[in-house]
Amino acid sequence: MSTSYFDEADPRTVLAEYPVGDAFLAGPARMSRDALRGLQERRLRSVLARAWEVPFYRRRWRDAGLEPGDVRGLDDLAKLPPFSKTDLMRSIQEHPPFGDYHGLDLAAGEARESVVLHTTSGTTGAPQPLFFGAWDREVQNALLARAYRFQGLRPDDVVHSVYGFGTVNGGHFVREALVHFTKALVIPAGTGLETPSTQQVELMRRFRATVLVGFADYLRTLAGVAREQGIEPGRDIPVRMVSGHLGQESRAALARAWGGAEVYDWYGVGDTGSVAAEGPDRDGLYVWEDAHLVEILDPDSHAPVPDGERGNLCVTVLFKHSVYPIVRFDTNDVTSIRTGRSPLDLGLRRIEGFRGRSDNMVKLRGVNVYPTAIAGLIAEHPAPTGEYVCRVRRTGAREEMTVTVESRHRDEATRAELARALRARLGVEVDVELVPAGATAKLTGIERRQKPLRLIDERPGAKG
């Protein structure tokens, strides 16, 4: 029997199982640990059953000496080897054009489930195909709507989104989440390549945008563009809330840039959707534990690290049991489990938030440096605009890094101050170069990329 997309993902059923708003706060957010574990066990069994049908998982798990009966629940999860984007891209290379990490070919014709195809942004390499079944897609949408509403999104808000479109998942996903599961009005502007920055600012002013969503780097740039046009954020554009991917950028600086708006962080990647989000307390990101199992693993050994210690975030998605199941996906994103009691007295665990990528780390004279950490450090000085790029090179046997910083003042005293501050906070000396506002834009791709580049590796044999 033929089914439609909405037969496979009835919104009422989605919201009943993955509630949003008050229903979320009264339901999953208040569950006891025992009740939550029981729910996770039931959902994990469905995901594991589907994953054993997918060639990618079957091959990897049998290579690890496992059979289906060997992994029955949460206590057995660590027996399964984690995988990363490197493994997915190898799958694509060996099984072109889509790889074999999904169940796209497990049924044909009318028997096949509805499939949504997008790609990653390609920030860390070639874009990766992303596959969603109807159920996966709508649960993912509901969970992002959960995040926005948890942070204070209201039905009468006008939301300006700068997430990219094209084949990239981001813009489509965010728009669907807002349209399908909130009453807010959405301005889907996209990146600066899709809608020029000056036009974006005018759209915000004209349509009275109250909420901005996107990556912090470009949102900060847009505030500067507004002021250049004589438009004052907070007065001419009544933004009251900003929700995006903050990394280690200064939320205080972003709030000031947008007239004192409340700033919130959330975390997710294309494969998983929204995994965690800050709430009104802004004390860590609450993990949607009814939808995701999260582990923090040592980047080298893949062994779990204690709560409070940093490592790679590894995610198992409990609602993806159709086209592309995800079991122990090592994101290579560095974070930690937040310890201590929730200020909101919620039962969900919290993560610290994005603290860099373990596969984008630079080791300088024995010290680990994450280029994304530079953002928070330079934000503490009044001269930089917030834009920068790191360039790594090898001089003899020594690794060197130059941080090129856009700055309002470019005198030697400012350069020396920033160099000393970075050395003190990073624990290693780096060169600092000061350039005018806008000078790093071609290198970072701030207006055309979903995520701007912050590291250019000039060492022989490096990929980027």
Image: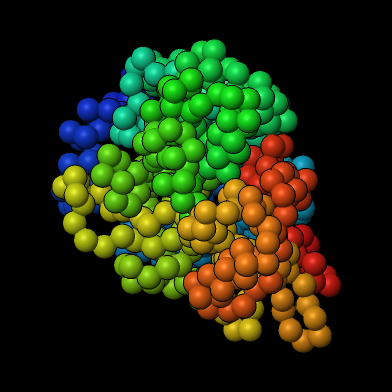
For image coordinates 31% across by 30% down, the residue present is 152
Q: On the rendered structure, is 156 left or right of 105?
A: left
Q: Is residue 170 visible?
A: no
The x and y percentages for residue 448 are 71, 37
Outermost residue, bottom direction? 397
As displayed, is residue 37 above or below residue 323?
A: below
Q: Nearer the viewer, residue 347 or 230?
A: 230
Outermost residue, right direction? 460
The x and y percentages for residue 337 are 34, 61
Q: Is residue 440 visible?
A: yes
The x and y percentages for residue 62 are 55, 63
As displayed, is residue 330 above or below residue 226?
A: below
The x and y percentages for residue 118 are 64, 33
For image coordinates 21% across by 61% down, the residue present is 340
Coloring scheme used: rainbow
Q: Nearer the viewer, residue 290 or 222?
A: 222
Q: Nearer the viewer, residue 283 or 220?
A: 220
Q: On the rendered structure, is 86 left or right of 274?
A: right
As displayed, is residue 18 above or below residue 384?
A: above
Name the quadrant of the C terminus. bottom right
For image coordinates 35% across by 49% down, the residue present is 285
Q: On the rendered structure, is 37 left or right of 336?
A: left
For image coordinates 80% across by 67% down, the residue present is 458
